[in-house]
Amino acid sequence: MIEWLVPADVGVTASAALIALSAATSFLTAAAGIGGGIVLIAVMAVLVPAHALIPIHGVVQIGSNAGRAAIMIRGVEWKILAPFCLGSLIGAAFGGLTAVQLPPAILNIGLACFILWSVWGPAVATQGRFKVLITGIVSSFLTMFFGATGTFVSAMVKSMRLGRLEHVATHSTCMVAQHGIKVVAFGLLGFNYAPYAGLIVAMVLSGFLGTVIGKRVLVKMNDRTFHRVLAVLLSILALRLLYEGIALLAIF
């Protein structure tokens, strides 16, 4: 049984840590609206082989986001799903086919500026399908290389001024679609998920437990507090991207 849960190139200690971390990061995203995916991939980058990092993270994120979407299904803004999925398909196709990676410094600075503008900039008409389509294209393209683009998508959803439950439900549904498309794309490109199946299942189950607990915290929070917390978290993550981008520019 233990061999089924532990891929040969990950190990027992790392697998146990990843299962526990999946629960913790799912709790974070369910309670605060963002942050879990980035924390998870940052730790996975240390514990999981590089070639398997983004595909495995994608499958785990499908399970984590699907759990959130399922228990908050009434809050989903379904009208944005079609243009977002279309954009995600286009972005994943370009991301899977291209051999050119964007300069990390410019990418980080650009993402940081977009997130900060979306959080703190003036309110504009953001529910148009074109913006949702573009968000799907850009975020899906980027996720093929960097894995965790939930912050980018969350900034778009936040600009729709939804309630806290509606925000988390809609964001989770978008991420299920995007990660699903990415996972299929990596499969078509030849990645073998079978050796990691047991670990993935365990991480998805522990992630659902974290989601259930996180929802209880979310329900007790009011919309104003939620959006304040979300704005602070998005800003911190954006400033981190900005710092990394400037640091990379300084190196060169």
Image (spheres, rainbow, N blue to C red):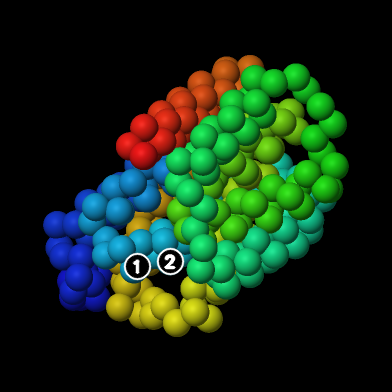
Tell me where residue 251 appears, x and y as whole percent: 33, 37
Identify residue type, mark 2: Pro
Q: Residue at x 79, y 56 (%)?
A: 83
Q: Residue at x 69, y 21 (%)?
A: 121
Tell me where residue 110 appears, x and y as whole percent: 57, 37
Left or right position of 63 against 124: left
Left or right position of 163 against 64: right
Q: Residue at x 68, y 53 (%)?
A: 136
Q: Residue at x 65, y 26 (%)?
A: 117
Identify residue type, mark 1: Ala
Q: Is disc 1 surrounded by few (<14), some (14 to 19) or many (20+) residues within 10 Å?
A: some
Quadrant of image for the C terminus: top left
Label 2 to label 1, Cα distance in Å? 6 Å
Q: Which mark is residue 55?
A: 2
Q: Is residue 216 visible?
A: no
The residue that label 1 is drawn on is 52
Residue 155 appears in which quarter of the rendering? top right
C-beta proximity under 8 Å, tags 2 and 1 = yes
- Relative to the observer, which residue lies in front, 17 or 132? 132
Report helix, strand or loop for mark 2: helix
Left or right position of 119 against 59: right
